[in-house]
């Protein structure tokens, strides 16, 4: 087994591309490995899935992928947990994520970031096929916004392209973990043009 000590914040080796097969084809989302065998994503990413696959470190040294199963999903909070058995050679013995409450009793504007695989980062390979490049989205969250609906709203720069007018350029970013001050919000992103929203649930700190 390979021990992967937790860095102070988002670990790029734990960012997961979620590939979902349905009766109508395939779709993509994003997620984050919160422990050796668990990946956090958005419930709507895996809703109605016939099969799910998790891929980490795509096209990089150490790339791996494996089938995953949805073991818990909650439509109201739009959260889902997948179980996955990483293949031999994949980073293991990860430090398990810890959760805590997000303060919502005072004015603040928080610098945040998320990393995932939006549609607008689709690229063409030399063989003519397509892939999704990883995107780091930096933005802000206004702590008092959306208290009535219990969500957090992440404001980011506009997408760099709009490859499909019939779909959000942020499609595929859904499920990405949102980080603030080296702590992870248990808040999967939901695709939207300039504001990405997710449930106001908890923060997660990698120790």
Image (tube, helix red, strand yellow):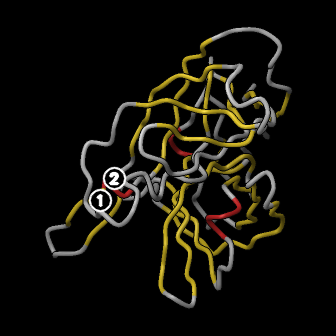
Task: Measuring from the top left, give residue 206's x and y in whole percent.
Answer: 72, 29
Please state which of residues 23 and 68 is positioned toward the viewer in this rendering: 23
Q: Tell me what residue is drawn at x 46 percent, y 53 percent.
A: 57
3D distance between C-alphas at marks 2 and 1: 6 Å
Q: Tell me what residue is drawn at x 75 percent, y 27 percent.
A: 205
In the rendered structure, which disc, 2 or 1, sits on the residue that comes first in sequence? 1
Q: Residues within 10 Å of mark 1 (few under 14, many from 20)?
A: some
- Quarter of image, res 182: top right
Task: Measuring from the top left, give residue 136's x and y in whole percent.
Answer: 42, 37
Quadrant the C terminus occupies? top right
Q: Is residue 171 shown above or below 70? A: above
Give the foreground label among 2 and 1. 1
Please state which of residues 1 and 31 is positioned toward the viewer in this rendering: 31
Q: Is residue 78 shown above or below 188? A: below
User: Which residue has dot 2 on it?
Assistant: 133
Q: Secondary structure at mark 2?
A: loop
Task: Measuring from the top left, give residue 180's x and y in whole percent.
Answer: 62, 22
Q: Residues within 10 Å of mark 2 (few under 14, many from 20)?
A: some
Is residue 190 rendered to the left or right of residue 59? right
Q: Secondary structure at mark 1?
A: strand
Residues at circles 2 and 1 in contact by the CB criterion of under 8 Å: yes
Q: Tell me what residue is drawn at x 31 percent, y 52 percent.
A: 121
Is residue 65 rendered to the left or right of residue 186? left
* Residue 122 image label: 1
């Amino acid at each position: 087994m390979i021990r992967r000590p937790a860095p102070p914040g988002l670990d790029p080796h734990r960012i997961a591309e979620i590939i979902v097969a349905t009766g109508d084809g395939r779709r993509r989302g994003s997620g984050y490995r919160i422990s050796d065998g668990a990946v956090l994503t958005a419930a709507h990413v895996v809703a109605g899935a016939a099969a799910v696959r998790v891929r980490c470190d795509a096209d990089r040294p150490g790339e791996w992928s494996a089938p995953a199963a949805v073991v818990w999903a909650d439509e109201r909070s739009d959260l889902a947990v997948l179980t996955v058995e990483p293949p031999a050679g994949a980073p293991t013995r990860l430090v398990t994520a810890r959760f805590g409450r997000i303060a919502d009793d005072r004015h603040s504007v928080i610098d945040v970031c998320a990393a995932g695989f939006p549609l607008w980062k689709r690229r063409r390979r030399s063989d003519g096929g397509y892939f999704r490049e990883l995107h780091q989205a930096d933005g802000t969250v206004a702590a008092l916004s959306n208290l009535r609906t219990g969500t957090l709203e992440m404001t980011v720069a506009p997408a760099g392209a709009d490859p499909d007018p019939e779909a959000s350029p942020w499609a595929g970013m859904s499920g990405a973990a949102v980080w603030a001050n080296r702590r992870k919000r248990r808040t999967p992103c939901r695709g939207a043009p300039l504001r990405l929203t997710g449930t106001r649930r908890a923060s997660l700190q990698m120790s």
